[in-house]
Image: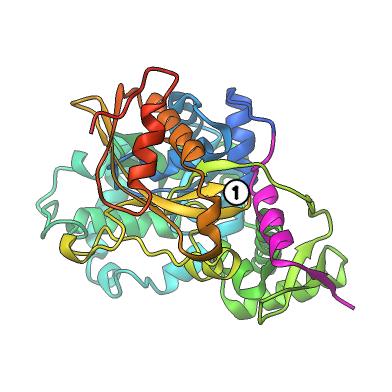
């Protein structure tokens, strides 16, 4: 019979698997260990408070040195690289062979730019020849008549599209970033020799990715395990069956969940969780919005593409984690010119979580975030059900940071 878990146990298992409740260490070794526990760090271009790939480690480690992560993640050649492992993400370079099967699928059919490669074969050859002679290169380094944007955001030039197609196929790889712009190179220019041409067989790779998903999530349904690395449902279910037969995955039932769930045989079951963090919208704890709502009762939608008058919580609201609950959300902006962290809105969750939204603990998180960003002051707007209490708590700050709203 499947083990029965309460909703609270499932939340604590997720958070423990994700590295919360541990002793914090912000050395280079501790930073890399925390990142490896997650398996990847999702990248995103929005930089209103801080870029998303820095935030999961801050949530787990506190005020670590971002330059250390940069050296780990973006040095070329390095121990980490980039690829589409969930969305665009940083991942250990030794994991690249696990994605050979998906690169082959993208070579057969590109879901982003269908038909582009066939219509631009000459351009793709030119780009490969250019990288062979001059690489690594960013798209902006390429002098070509096709290197013209066709609008904002995703209005990429043909050169950028071509490089991205080659990148997804594995014909080129990331050679780090300059001012957050990806540089491209041929594999032999930046990858260790031991990885050149190495491919993990498809079934073996998917089975390993599902195993890692189970370890990273603590407890999850088949859909949860599929989403972590964006795997297909049928492939995931096959891998689950194989891992269950081998005794690595164990079936469980979670109170309130409609679907059966799975845990890794080594999953920790903490009886309590002491945690306090501001989460990125792309933190693994909340990046699957359906799972976040099921596990925490937390309905979360990012509003960066929502017109300002229609926003409910703010442009870039961050979920607030206290212990094993998501108790609120806060919209932060780093005003680097004025050296001020601006709290543009602050909200406590409605219902049973409201009582757990301790404004003093949240104020401590906000002060710590300001210090980590090198900002000297914090201001709080009037927008949000938590704004007044947070402002009052910040005014009692013992460390010199004071709300000046």
Name the colouring of the figure: rainbow
In this view, 279 is above or below 103: above
The residue at the point 43 percent across, 68 percent down is 106
Q: Hey, which quadrant is residue 11 in on the image? A: bottom right
Q: How many marks?
A: 1
Q: Is residue 11 magenta?
A: yes
Residue 146 in the figure: left or right of residue 184: left
Q: Which residues are magenta?
A: 1-22
- Quarter of the image with the C terminus is top left
Residue 79 horizontal side relative to residue 14, left or right: left
Quarter where residue 309 is shown: bottom left
Q: Nearer the viewer, residue 402 or 184?
A: 402
> Quick check: can you spot residue 238?
yes
Kind of element beneath mark 1: loop
Q: Is residue 169 above or below residue 69?
A: below
Residue 118 x, y percent position in the rendering: 28, 72
Residue holding disc 1: 39
Residue 3, quarter of the rendered image = bottom right
Q: Is residue 123 above or below residue 53?
A: below
Percent across and percent down for residue 200 are 65, 58
Residue drawn at (29%, 47%) of the image:
46
Farthest residue toward the top? 400
Residue 65, percent from left and from top: 47, 24
Q: Is residue 182 magenta?
A: no
């Amino acid at each position: 019979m499947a083990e029965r878990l309460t909703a609270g146990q499932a939340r604590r298992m997720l958070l423990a698997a994700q590295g919360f409740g541990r002793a914090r260490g912000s050395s280079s070794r501790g930073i890399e260990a925390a990142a490896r526990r997650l398996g990847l760090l999702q990248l995103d271009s929005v930089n209103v408070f801080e870029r998303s790939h820095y935030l999961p480690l801050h949530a787990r480690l506190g005020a670590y040195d971002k330059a250390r992560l940069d050296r780990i993640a973006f040095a070329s050649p390095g121990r980490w690289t980039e690829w589409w492992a969930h969305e665009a993400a940083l991942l250990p370079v030794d994991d690249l062979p696990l994605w050979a099967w998906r690169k082959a699928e993208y070579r057969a059919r590109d879901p982003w730019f269908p038909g582009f490669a066939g219509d631009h074969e000459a351009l793709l050859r030119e780009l490969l020849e250019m990288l062979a002679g001059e690489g690594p290169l960013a798209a902006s380094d390429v002098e070509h008549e096709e290197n013209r944007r066709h609008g904002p955001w995703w209005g990429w030039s043909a050169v950028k599209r071509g490089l991205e197609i080659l990148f997804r196929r594995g014909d080129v790889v990331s050679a780090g970033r300059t001012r957050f712009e990806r540089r491209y190179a041929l594999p032999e220019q930046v990858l260790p020799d031991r990885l050149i041409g190495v491919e993990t067989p498809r079934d073996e790779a998917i089975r390993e990715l599902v195993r890692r998903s189970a370890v990273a999530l603590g407890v999850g349904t088949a859909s949860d395990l599929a989403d972590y690395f964006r795997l297909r449902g049928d492939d995931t279910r096959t891998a689950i069956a194989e891992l269950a037969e081998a005794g690595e995955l164990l079936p469980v039932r979670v109170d309130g969940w409609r679907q059966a769930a799975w845990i890794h045989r080594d999953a920790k079951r903490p009886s309590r969780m002491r945690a306090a963090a501001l989460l990125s919208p792309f933190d693994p704890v909340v990046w699957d919005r359906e799972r976040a709502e099921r596990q925490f009762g937390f309905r979360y939608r990012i509003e960066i593409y929502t017109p300002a008058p229609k926003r409910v919580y703010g442009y870039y609201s961050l979920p607030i984690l206290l212990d094993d609950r998501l108790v609120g959300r806060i919209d932060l902006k780093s005003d680097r010119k004025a050296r001020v962290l601006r709290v543009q809105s602050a909200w406590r969750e409605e219902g049973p979580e409201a009582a757990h939204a301790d404004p003093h603990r949240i104020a401590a998180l906000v002060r710590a975030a300001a210090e980590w960003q090198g900002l000297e002051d914090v201001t709080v707007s009037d927008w949000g059900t938590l704004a007044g209490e947070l402002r009052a708590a910040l005014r009692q700050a013992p460390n010199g940071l004071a709300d000046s709203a």
